[in-house]
Amino acid sequence: MIVDDSSTDRTTQMIMELERFHGWVKGIYLKEQTKRDIGIGLSRVLKKGTEFAIDYCEKNGISFEYIGIVDGDILLEKDYFEKLISKFKENPKLGIASGQIFLQVGGKIKLDKMHKSVPIGAARLIRKACYNEIGGFPIGMAPDTICDIKAMMKGWETYQFEGIKVIHRRNAMSAEGLCKGMLHQSKRMYYLNYHPILIFAYALLESTRRPYYHVLFYLCGYFLCVFKREQKIQDKDIRDYFWRKRFGNIKKDMRAYLW
């Protein structure tokens, strides 16, 4: 488990308690991160956490074939990873996978509809060979998305499986308020080099959902990045993918290409 300085004292104490009772739990505490950051800060957490786990296994002679990622606000089925591993064994080309995510909203559980080829970032399993081939998690915004695209470019398959349940106790984009979440989403899409027409298409989709005004924050966030000429991802293959290929496929499946 990896903890940054933006986490609460209660979270840190809980992980320390788990370390005392379970030898397989190892806590890492990042002192350089002082506030919650679901952008570049998240990528640092993912990179340092996975690298620590891999290094620990190699030093202690622990063999493994998969790398699992689970957020702190996620509830999993008891045999969640066993079910996913069985899918990997059935398909040797499966590189990254997850179950299907349900949001816990107002005491009710509802399905968060996403395209089946898009594994959720909050509870995913990555084949070790795939992880090594794509170079692990990058430092930057949208590390999960970049890993998915790189994996597909390398010939790996990615998938979100029905019947394997994940409960997210809050929408990731609403952790600091819906409006801030929409600002982050738009900056993320600018960083990845989404075509402007896709931005307007996404805004149109969001404008049909309450509260309707939140779409204004989304558009403002994107065009503020354009005006300020914020830095985009340096990986040319990723930039070209979101500008050309993703835009070219929008007519085939609108929902698939707006995540």
Image: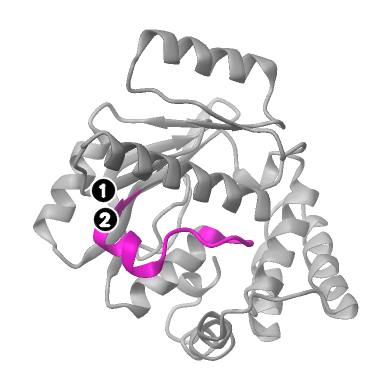
> How dense is the environment of label 1, judged by Cα within 10 Å: few (below 14), some, or many (20 and up)?
some
Query: In which quadrant of the rendered view does residue 206 lie?
Result: bottom right
Residue 213 is one of the magenta-drawn residues:
no
Residue in view at x 37 percent, y 43 percent: 55
Q: Which residues are magenta?
A: 125-143
Please name the amino acid that badge 2 sits on. Answer: Arg
Give the residue pinned by disc 2. 127
The residue under the point 78% across, 58% down is: 183
Where is residue 190 shown, x and y percent of the image? Answer: 71, 74
| Residue 165 pos. (x, y %) | 33, 39
Q: Position of residue 136 (x, y in %)?
A: 42, 60
Way the structure is coloured = one colour
**Residue 205 falls left or right of residue 121:** right
As helix, strand or loop, the secondary structure at mark 2 comes to strand
Q: Are marks 2 and 1 in contact (CB under 8 Å)?
A: yes
Most extreme residue toward the front is: 59
The correct choice, above or below, for 211 with respect to 143 in the image is: above
Mark 2 or mark 1, which has the lower sequence index?
1
| Cα–Cα gap, marks 2 and 1 | 5 Å
Q: Residue at x 69, y 60 (%)?
A: 185
Q: Which residue is mark 1?
A: 66
Depth order, front residue of 124/55: 55
User: Is residue 61 visible in this depiction of the protein?
Assistant: yes
Is residue 204 visible in the rendered image? The answer is no
Amino acid found under the numbered disc labelled 1 = Tyr
